[in-house]
Image: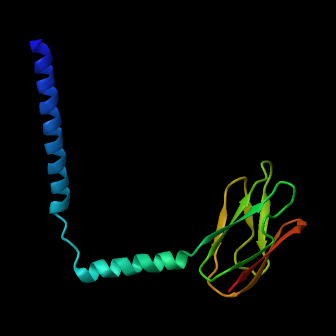
Amino acid sequence: MNIKYLALFFVIVSVAFAGCAEKEDSVQENSGDSFPSSEQASAEENDEDQTLMAAGELHMIRLGPLNTVNLPALEIPRGDTVSWWSHKKQGTFVLISEDGLFPAEELSYRVPFEYSFTASGTYLFTVEGIPEMNMTVTVM
């Protein structure tokens, strides 16, 4: 019976020391850092807000294995991103921006290609060798 109490005592002491050791480590990590001024903190928050605003929403266009496109026409606001996904298990699709927004992009199965639209306009995209697979993205 005394051995059980002794083992329990060692477990409690070990847990207590482990908690103290973690606190010391976290104090040591922060001791060399200075806290940012309120100006620095607000500048960092503004940078984060601008990044989030620039990111916009993400829209997915799926290129199907039977030469189908789930969204042949899409209207989005500036700052949004379009993500093209190939659902063709064998082979690839080659996505072409008819307006030269990016070089021809080879899409493998479930490996997306994303493009963020920063300028208003109407943009045409096709899949190389498959004329029925075309898409129009209108950016407002």
Establish if 131 lies above or below 39. Answer: above
Left or right placement of residue 125 versus residue 53 in this view? right
Q: Residue at x 46, y 80 (%)?
A: 50
Q: Which residue is drawn at 78% across and 56% down?
A: 92
- Number of on-image labels: 0
Q: Is residue 102 left or right of residue 17?
A: right
Residue 139 x/y as whole percent: 69, 83
**Where is residue 133, by image quadrant?**
bottom right
- x then y, percent, for residue 54: 53, 79
110 over 74 or under it: above or below = above
What residue lies at 84% left-to-right and 71% top-to-bottom?
134
Q: Residue at x 49, y 75 (%)?
A: 52
Place residue 12 in its image quadrant: top left
Nearer-the-camera pick, 114 or 80: 80
| Residue placed most toward the observer, 86 or 59 | 59
> Looking at the image, is 77 positioned above or below residue 96?
below
